[in-house]
Image (spheres, coloured by chain):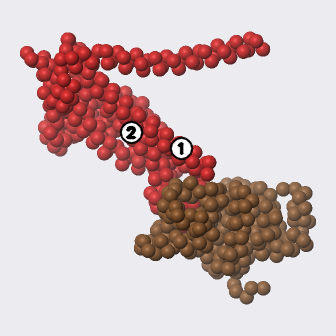
Chain colours: A brown, B red
Amino acid sequence: MDPRPPKFDVRHLDLWYGQTQALKDVSFSIDPNTITALIGPSGCGKSTFLRVLDRMNDLIEGVRVEGSVLYDGEDIFGDRDVIELRKRVGMVFQKPNPFPMSIWDNIAYGPRVHGVKDKKALSDLVERSLVQAALFDEVKDRLHKPALGLSGGQQQRLCIARVLAVEPDVLLMDEPTSALDPISTAKIETLLDELKRRYTIVIVTHNMQQAGRVSDRTGFFLHGELVEYAPTRDIFFNPRDERTENYISGRFG
Amino acid sequence: MKRQRALEKTIEATLFGAAAVSVLAVILITVFLFQSGLPLFGKVKVSEFLFSTDWAPTAATPRFGILSFIVGSFSVTGLSLLFAVPVGLAVGIYLAELAEKKNSRLIRSAVELLAGIPSVIYGLFGIAVISAASRTLFGGSGYSVLSAAIVLAIMTLPTIINVTEVSLRALPRELKEGSLALGATEWQTIGKVLVPAARSGIVAGVILGMGRAIGETMAVLMVGGNAPIMPTGLNSMVRTLTMNIITDMSYATGDHLTSLFATGIVLFAFILILNLGVQLILKRTISQVEGAAGA
């Protein structure tokens, strides 16, 4: 067991979209510098849960949350500034979403909105982030070209670099490779293993092999409930809940 | 089977006919306009027509210089955009990004209503309110470049508001989420990501509005003063190209009449250029979007 306190501590979390309950009494904790995979059939609440962690659900009208989520011991729904939270807890989306500007400007965007003005400091950040996201060598000669000219896999690594540039602490990833080809997927999975040393990563995935390959712990969601949360190996080879076993063995979902 | 094929052929032919009519209309208008206006340049040099400010079509030796009216059209239109663009952008952004559903519905129907008001009503409003206010505030007759520009600005607002809102709404939601997820504020997201991303559409909308403003006749005629002089300031009376055509049309004959058609050619050319500009911009936008999708 990790002796350090958990990065996230989720307690009795309920979430409603209007009248529909999307998350039911979810409780678990996420250790620092681990990769946690969230799996489950479509509409099970795993993406909704991910979006609670950086409060992106705030954007949707009619969302109501009960229970608590502690990040480094502090309630994210409390007085904590949501801007500060999102700076510390970065998110990579399912579909690569580079801004329609140059590669350089894409990466520099985050630091700039947080007040970094010095050109040299920005340049260093851009390069460091691209190196970390294993993209630098591919784009170093065209940093000032439009980011939309990159391939899908490169765009997704650009989005990862863009998040890294604001120097976050946690990376949330919502099916980050579902729109990518196998080679790009492999590159990003290798990258995840590297990034784990510095960041805590939570990844939602539809791809169970991916969950098996990259994650330390896996949570299985079904109908808004967290059915089982355990070391990934146990989830796949020794599930305790029958529903988990049915899902893993492909009987539904 | 056969009957169905015949029916489809008929429908196709009818639609093609309808499309052909609109193309034909454009061609006919162009031919007719040039036919009626070009003969003027047998008697008056093009350069004199475009660059002289001396307009005396009924003098013993008639002189046809429309520079004052070209300047009039552009100063009124330009000034009106100066008023309309910031307000239109602000309202468009508010509707697309900030307004609650109830408010945005209300504002949107008001804007639609604004677009449907006949221009003569704008003219009446201009006389009763804007010219009167201008008279009180700045002296003079109240019929001026400024009054005409304000009326035109109100008339162009709906176009600019609509296009701004539509361009912003057409952006993928992921763009906004991507920015907010980095910890940007809503304002930073709007100003640094969303508006620049929607830029081409917004510019196209502004040019469309400009086309509407430069072609507008009735409302500016009612508040512009219509003196055939070079405007010297905001409070100066002004005659635009459109006003020049309508004012003398009822009685002009001979070269005078031809000169009005020639004024029409100039106006037509300006509007053509603006439209080509819009199409160019829209084409660029589309290829940008396709580039993004294909990557």
- Classify mark 2: helix, strand or loop: helix
Decide which of tag 2 and tag 1 comes sooner along the chain: 2
Which residue is most to the bottom?
A3
Q: Give the amino acid type for the residue marked by disc 2 in the picture.
A: Ile
Q: Are marks 2 and 1 in contact (CB under 8 Å)?
A: no
Q: Which residue is mark 2?
A: B207
Q: Is residue B220 visible?
A: yes
Give above or below for A26 relative to B186.
below
Q: Residue at x 33, y 28 (%)?
A: B269
Return the x and y of residue B277 as percentages of the image width and height: 40, 37
Give above or below for B134 relative to A12.
above
Q: Which residue is mark 1?
A: B287
- Classify mark 1: helix, strand or loop: helix
Q: Give the amino acid type for the residue marked by disc 1 in the picture.
A: Ser
Which chain letter matches label 1?
A: B
* Of residues A189 and A72, the one drawn nearer to the viewer in this rendering: A189
Q: Quadrant of residue B217?
A: top left
Tag in front: 2 or 1: 1
Q: Residue at x 8, y 15 (%)?
A: B60
Return the x and y of residue B273 as percentages of the image width and height: 36, 33
Which chain letter matches label 2?
A: B
Q: Is residue A55 visible?
A: no
Q: Is residue A234 left or right of residue A158?
A: right
Q: Is residue B26 left or right of residue B257?
A: right
* Of residues A206 and B261, the one drawn nearer to the viewer in this rendering: B261
Q: CA distance from mark 2 to mark 1?
A: 19 Å
Task: Assign the N terminus of chain B to one quadrant of the image.
Answer: top right
Q: Quadrant of residue A21?
A: bottom right
Q: Residue at x 74, y 72 (%)?
A: A36
Q: Residue at x 32, y 18 (%)?
A: B33
